[in-house]
Amino acid sequence: MTASQSPIWHPFTQHGLGDTIPLIARGEGARLYDANGHYWIDAISSWWVTTHGHAHPRIMAAIRDQSEKLDQLIFAGWTHEPAETLAAELIRITPDPLTRVFFSDSGSTSVEVALKMALGYWYNIGEPRSRILVLEHSYHGDTIGTMSVGERGVYNRAWQPLLFDVDTVPFPHEGMERATLDALEAACSKKPAAFIVEPLILGAGGMLIYPAWVLAEMRAICSRHNVLFIADEVMTGWGRTGTRFACDQAGVIPDIVCLSKGLTGGAMPLAVTLCIEPIFQAHWSTDRAKTFYHSSSYTANPIACAAAAANLAIWRDEPVQHRIDTLADAQGAHLSMLAHDPRVENPRRLGTIAAFDIAARDAGYLSNLAPRLIAFYRDRGVLLRPLGNTVYVMPPYGITPTDLAQVWDAIAASLDMG
């Protein structure tokens, strides 16, 4: 159907262009099907959330089972078994200093929670700090706080009056890493509240990759200056970068970490913000004024928590890391076949994520190339959503070699469009 035939206002969609919007009836593995059986290969995991594949049997079974027991419960002063099980398992698989789990319902809200935790910590210990440090080109969500700590541009220009000021550290481009670290050192000396970063790769900022040693040094600088270190692992978590969490590759333990997207295997909206004990203790008091005042109606929804617990069981019981390694190798092989094409610029890969830029006269986020590419891929049975002239592939880990080859064949056929 076309956008004009539906009352729905879709996200990140310019309805004035009149583009066709496929109506999907079901999903299985890496494929999405319409009612007529036509399929598209989901090469971006439906905005980076689907890890094991659509409608994974174990996760679907957990959702069905929980839906017949408890669908929803206020989480302010009450609890339930799926949340307790999930929280305990998250604490088990993350580094020991992370001792507390705060539930929310999306990546954006997990970051909002992290920012409020950081500022609340300093306020409650009697040393109010309000400045946040951010990395250039970052994206952390579309709520007011997350837009404030993300890159400024056309996608948030209308709401500029609502955004708070931040201090920006330049992205550590190859050969310029020292400039980034020096800038962070100088900014940390002014005693900001926290530094927030997407570890190893910036997602919506263009799939920009930087090395693990830089992440480790950024963490060390924050530690030296007693600046809270927030890792936004909403996209990078759950194996996308080749390890369960991107911070693992740098031996980094954040003070606060944000998780969502693949937390439920992509089946249900859920997020968590984990923090170290001192942050929790700064809010623990007999004084109700020190309460951490943040919630949403669906905090720790039991059905979503059950889906997440099933996802963690899959990680525990099945060879997920082997699937990730296999996909990463396959992605590297496909990318290498295009790497020397003059129409391909800056080919890059991190774990299961492969990306490159199409040499184009019209580059950047608002490149007119992007909508043409989206339509081109859609007509060839592939769901890809380039970031301007940046094409990236981030499929579910269970994608078949045949489907992955179809994705890369479509990409190869699109290179002349630049």
Image: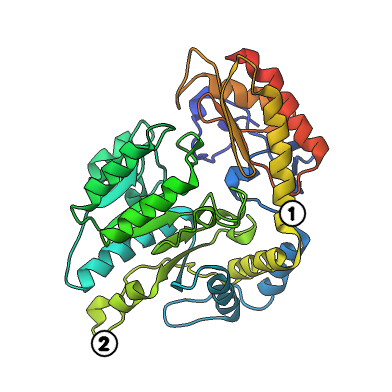
**Corner quadrant of residue 139:** top left
Which of the pair 213/30 is nearer the observer? 213
Q: Three-letter amino acid code at disc 1?
A: His
Which residue appears at 69% of the width and 37% of the height? 331
**Residue marked by disc 2:** 286
248 sits left or right of 266 in the view: left
Residue 251 visible? The answer is yes
User: Is label 1 or label 2 in front?
Assistant: 1
178 sits left or right of 339 in the view: left
Which residue appears at 40% of the width and 46% of the height? 142
Residue 83 placed where, x, y %?
A: 56, 75
Residue 369, which numbered label?
none
Which of the pair 255/69 is nearer the observer? 255
Residue 93 placed where, x, y %?
A: 58, 69
222 sits left or right of 94 in the view: left
Which residue appears at 62% of the width and 77% of the height? 70
Q: How crowded is mark 1: few (under 14 residues within 10 Å), some or many (20 or more)?
A: few
Residue 330 placed where, x, y %?
A: 74, 38
Quadrant where the C terminus is found in the figure? top right
**Corner quadrant of residue 84:** bottom right
Which of the pair 347/366 is nearer the observer? 347
**Residue marked by disc 1:** 322
Quadrant where the N terminus is found in the figure? top right
The residues tagged by marks 1 and 2 sit, at their Cα atoms, a distance apart of: 49 Å
Tell me the SS state at disc 1: helix
Which residue appears at 74% of the width and 36% of the height? 40
The disc, 1 or 2, on the residue closer to the chain's N-terminal end is 2
Q: Three-letter amino acid code at disc 2?
A: Thr
Residue 48 placed where, x, y %?
A: 59, 46
**Corner quadrant of residue 293:** bottom left
Which of the pair 418/170 is nearer the observer? 170
